[in-house]
Image: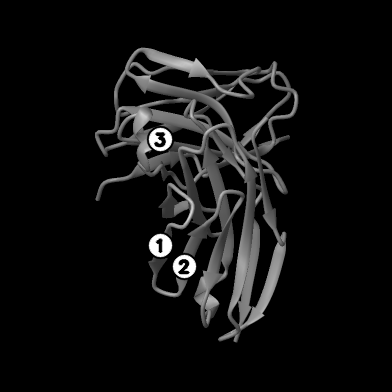
Amino acid sequence: EDQVTQSPEALRLQEGESSSLNCSYTVSGLRGLFWYRQDPGKGPEFLFTLYSAGEEKEKERLKATLTKKESFLHITAPKPEDSATYLCAVQNSGYALNFGKGTSLLVTP
Amino acid sequence: DGGITQSPKYLFRKEGQNVTLSCEQNLNHDAMYWYRQDPGQGLRLIYYSQIVNDFQKGDIAEGYSVSREKKESFPLTVTSAQKNPTAFYLCASSMEYTGVGLGEKLFFGSGTQLSVL
């Protein structure tokens, strides 16, 4: 059975304090790993898709990386507006998409 | 602007009542989805539709029903058979169902919070 585990559940950072969020997964045939950002009371917003181990993608202060067992979302010098819940989702060879429970990030000034 | 519109933002259900959540998209996407989000849990798929007049059950379809009579619309009915309906409901779309496997991103609406009176 496919599993997606995100850690930590919650993370509090000072503005400018870089850190990483983790998404560990087991899947039958990885088709893609997705990162989304979700603000309170809103729908998730797409950030990245990663397909294979070794792949990296960047967007502003965010960088996503992928290995055969996990993905990291690195946040460099975060700002308060980066505060949100970050969701990881993994798609298997049968197109089923499994979401993790998310990491709630709070960046304080 | 293109996007997905969900309504209402908040909805209250009385005991034994059916309620319908609206989802409309103007992205010309073929595939549409309904997810349920509970605090501390990942998104769970209720129903999905790959094309007009066709839909499939997801992981937690019991107590829910859908229709897809138009490409733009995918309403979700929460029936009285759903004993624990309180949750945040998210509608999403993608260009094509198999396209999601090709890195095609999901576009989400802003959600409907359903509560039981």
> Is label 2 in contact with label 1 (beta carbons under 8 Å)?
yes
Name which residue lies at 41% across and 26% down: B74
Q: What's the distance in space between the residues labelled 2 and 3, CA to CA?
A: 21 Å
Give the residue number, with chain letter if any, for mark 1.
A57
Who is closer to the viewer here, B116 or A39?
A: A39
Q: Which mark is residue A63?
A: 2
Amino acid type, residue under disc 1 in the picture: Lys
Q: Which mark is residue B101?
A: 3
Dot 2: element:
strand
Q: Is residue A43 visible?
A: no
Q: Is residue B38 shown left or right of residue A79? A: right
Q: x, y percentage for residue B57? A: 54, 18
SS for dot 3: helix
> Which mark, residue B115?
none
The quadrant in which residue B30 appears is top left
Compared across the picture, whether A44 is left or right of A103 comes to left
A67 left or right, relative to B117: left
Mark 2 to mark 1: distance in Å? 6 Å
Q: Is residue A3 visible?
A: yes
Q: Which residue: 64% across, 24% down? A: B60
- In-front residue for pair A24/A99: A24
Q: Residue A73: x, y in percent? A: 54, 64
Q: Earlier in the sequence, mark 2 or mark 1?
A: 1
